[in-house]
Amino acid sequence: MGSPKLTTAGDGGDPPRLHITHPFHPLRGAVVRYVVTGKRWGEARVTVETAEGTLRSLPVGWTDLLPVDPVVTLGRGRAPFRLADLLTLADLVDGRTRR
C-alpha cells in the first residue's frame, strides 16, 4: 500500500481534514487535521492533529483518507473475513501442521 499523496503547501487554504472511522476508536467520527502520512511500525500511518491540538498517529485505514474498501461496501458488513486474509491464515496453519 503506497502512502497517500496529500500536501498542505502551496494552496494557502485550510489544511485537509479527515474523519476517524474505526468503529472502536474513542475519537470515531471526530474531524481532525491532516499532518503527514508515512510508513511506521511496518504499516501506512497518518499523523493527525485533534481539536485539542494533540498529535496522534493512526493506521491510514482507520480514517477516510483512503477510498472505502470494496469488501465493506459490496459485502455490506456480511463478510467477516477477506479472501486474502483467509488465504494467509491457511498458509500459516499449513506451515505449522507440517512441523
Image: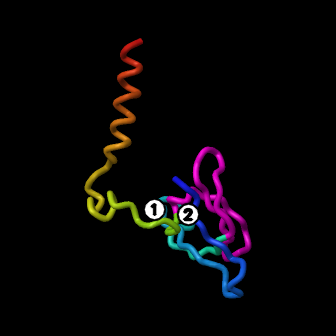
| Label 1 packing within 10 angstroms: few (<14), some (14-19), many (20+) | few
Q: Is the residue 60 above or below the residue 50 in the image?
A: above
What secondary structure do most residues of the magenta stretch adopt? strand
- At label 2, which amino acid type do we have? Pro
Q: Residue at x 27, y 62 (%)?
A: 74
Tag count in the figure? 2
Q: Residue at x 41, y 65 (%)?
A: 68
The location of residue 33, given as percent across then percent down, is 65, 75
Identify the colour scheme used.
rainbow
Q: Is residue 68 left or right of residue 62?
A: left
Residue behind mark 2? 26
Residue behind mark 1? 23
Res. 35 mark: none
Q: Residue at x 67, y 65 (%)?
A: 36
Magenta highlight range: 35-62
Q: Is the residue 82 above or below the residue 29 in the image?
A: above
Q: Quadrant of residue 14?
A: bottom right
Q: Residue at x 51, y 53 (%)?
A: 1
User: Separation of disc 1 and disc 2 at Cα?
Assistant: 9 Å
- Quick check: is 21 in the magenta stretch? no
Q: Decide: marks 1, 2 in contact (CB < 8 A)?
A: no
SS category of the residue bearing label 2: loop
The location of residue 67, given as percent across then percent down, is 44, 67
Q: Is residue 67 left or right of residue 17?
A: left
Q: Is the residue 74 above or below the residue 87 in the image?
A: below
SS category of the residue bearing label 1: loop
